[in-house]
Image (tube, rainbow, N blue to C red):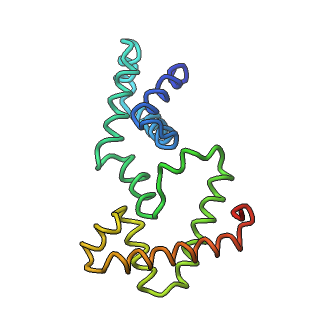
Amino acid sequence: MLSKHLNKIQEVALKITNGNKVDAQDLTQDLCVIILEYNSDKMKTIIENGHLIFWSARVLMNQYVRSNSAFKTKYYTKLRTENFDVTNFQYFDNIDELLEFENKIDFIKDKMKDLHEYDRLLFEIYFQSGKSIRKLAKDTGISTTSIYTTLKNVKKYLINEAKSNYKELET
């Protein structure tokens, strides 16, 4: 019964997530679980009245927008706190590509441990906050020149380490 509506539901989820394939897939899977756990008599009435797509769109939107939804608390927030940018995952077509990406992230995290604490912390703050160098300088009291130089050196170090370990990055 649900399978004949699944393509339309996935289209709705993709629109809600502004084209983010991974979020759309996760939302669709969450919706399937919600439908399975929902009162079967009420679900039957929703389907018989032709309201499944509308009902699903409302549930998908609520799951995606509300900060306390199961989708946000279980998946989305967990990925964000592990320093993964969920928007990047939409570019992976299979699990092997995603695992390779995760291996590279682990490699970078490991190389970050070799940095001086000041350099590592400043780079992590810059990366996680998404702030400009000027805004970061204003917030921390560190000069923009110092922040710029530190970030440039850390990036150069990480690029050199990555190039020496990942042949596909060599130019």
Q: Nearer the viewer, residue 56 or 13?
A: 13
Tell me: residue 82, above or below residue 85. Answer: below
Quadrant position of residue 150: bottom left
Q: Is residue 160 left or right of residue 113?
A: right
Q: For the C terminus, give its image quadrant.
A: bottom right
Q: Position of residue 81 (x, y in %)?
A: 41, 63
Quadrant position of residue 77: bottom left
Tell me: residue 159, above or below residue 59. Answer: below
Residue at the location (48% across, 48% down)?
87
Residue at the location (37% across, 61% down)?
130
Q: Nearer the viewer, residue 131 or 121?
A: 131
Q: Is residue 59 left or right of residue 162?
A: left
Q: Is residue 28 left or right of residue 59?
A: right
Q: Nearer the viewer, residue 118 or 76?
A: 118
Residue at the location (48% across, 42% down)?
26
Q: Nearer the viewer, residue 101 or 45?
A: 101
In the picture as drawn, the residue positioned furthest to the right comes out as 167
Q: Position of residue 9 (x, y in %)?
A: 46, 26
Residue at the location (25% across, 79% down)?
141
In the picture as drawn, the residue positioned furthest to the top comes out as 49
**Number of numbered markers:** 0
In the picture as drawn, the residue positioned furthest to the bottom comes out as 116
Tell me: residue 121, above or below residue 99. Answer: below
